[in-house]
Each structure stands twice: as structure tokens, then as C-alpha cells.
Amino acid sequence: MPSKTESAKPKGAEKKSIRLVCIADTHGFHRKLDLPAGDILMHAGDLDGCSVEAIDDFNAWLGTLPFRHKLVIAGNHDLLFDRKPRLARAHLTQAIYLQDSGVGLEGLNFGGSPVGRRSFRSSAPWPLRTTGEPHRGTDQGNVGEGLGEVADQAPGFAVVLL
């Protein structure tokens, strides 16, 4: 048994802290934000992705930020991601875009979906897409097994940290 002056943890077993900054619903006002320092920035939807110009401006702003990693999930107002997803994604080069997918960063697993969890107003999921194939979404558990952080864009809440 270690003495009071000795650590019970072996050297190198200390967990590294990660500062996660979560934002959502910026609706084109991202340049007005005064963000705290952090390691990972997560934008959980409604960036104002209605046009290529809006996505280009958001992408350029992301490029000025000092975060090591940037994650973006589309929201219900980010219509270009719904109507022309390949075009929208091609203009978002400064971030990892999560659409029913996950990524491991800094020893953490993140998952994201533009499909919201069930709303307090309705028992139906709140999808981004109104046309085409339905998204799998976080309600069906298809974003990824073993995720520690899951984000979706929904009324009432945008980011769920588990």
C-alpha cells in the first residue's frame, strides 16, 4: 500500500484532460462569438448552411480558430446539406463532418447525426432530411457502438455528453 506521499497511480497513468467547446444554432452569427480556448470544437447544427457562400464563410472562420480538431453536424436549417450534400460537404474543409458517423479524437469517440432525438413535443424523430432515404440517426443507435460523446441537432438540446 502506498504511503501518503506516494501516488497510488503508476507514472504515465494520469488521464490527459481535453477541453471540449460545444456550440450550436449560430445561424450565420459565428463571427460574433467569443469562444473559450479548447482542444476540440463541436458545432451541433444550424450554422446557416443554406448556400455555398454561407458554408464558405463558416469554413473560412473555422480555419482561423486555434482548436486542434473541429467537428460539425448539420441542423434542420442547414438546407444545402440536405438538398446538395456532396456540394455542401465539399465546401466544409476545415472540419470533420459527422453524418450518421463517428470519429476517434484525443482518445475519445465522437458520433454525430443530423437526425434529432425524439422531441419533447412529439414522439417522432426530428430529421434534417425531408427527401430521399431516411437517415439512420442516433435514436436507432446506428451512429456507432461504444461512443462516449454523441451529438445531434434537436429542439431542447443539441449535445449529449455521456
Image (cartoon, rainbow, N blue to C red):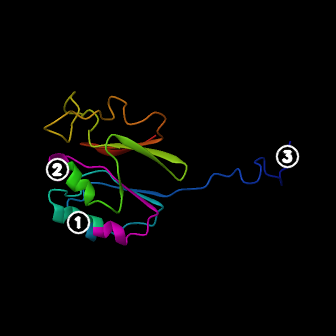
Query: 69 above or below 10?
Result: below
Residue 75 shown in magenta: yes
Query: 119 above or below 87?
Result: above
Q: Which amino acid lies under the numbered mark 2 shown in the image of this protein? A: Lys
Q: Position of residue 56 (x, y in %)?
A: 23, 66
In this rendering, position of residue 148 left or right of residue 112: right
The dot on residue 38 is none
- Mark 3 lies on a secondary structure that is loop
In this rendering, position of residue 27 left or right of residue 73: left
Q: Position of residue 113 (x, y in %)?
A: 31, 42
Q: Position of residue 21 (x, y in %)?
A: 41, 58
**Residue under pointer 3:** 2
Q: Which amino acid lies under the numbered mark 1 shown in the image of this protein? A: Asp
Q: Position of residue 15 (x, y in %)?
A: 63, 51
**Residue under pointer 1:** 56
The dot on residue 84 is 2
> Closer to the camera: disc 3 or disc 1?
1
Residue 80 shown in magenta: yes
Q: Which residues are magenta?
A: 60-83
> Closer to the camera: disc 1 or disc 2?
2
Judge by depth and name the residue closer to the eye, 24 or 67: 67
Residue depicted at 25% across the width and 35% down the height: 135
Q: Upstream in the sequence, badge 3 or badge 2?
A: 3
- Judge whether residue 33 can be spotted in this image: no
- Mark 1 lies on a secondary structure that is helix
Q: Upstream in the sequence, badge 1 or badge 2?
A: 1
Residue depicted at 22% across the width and 62% down the height: 55
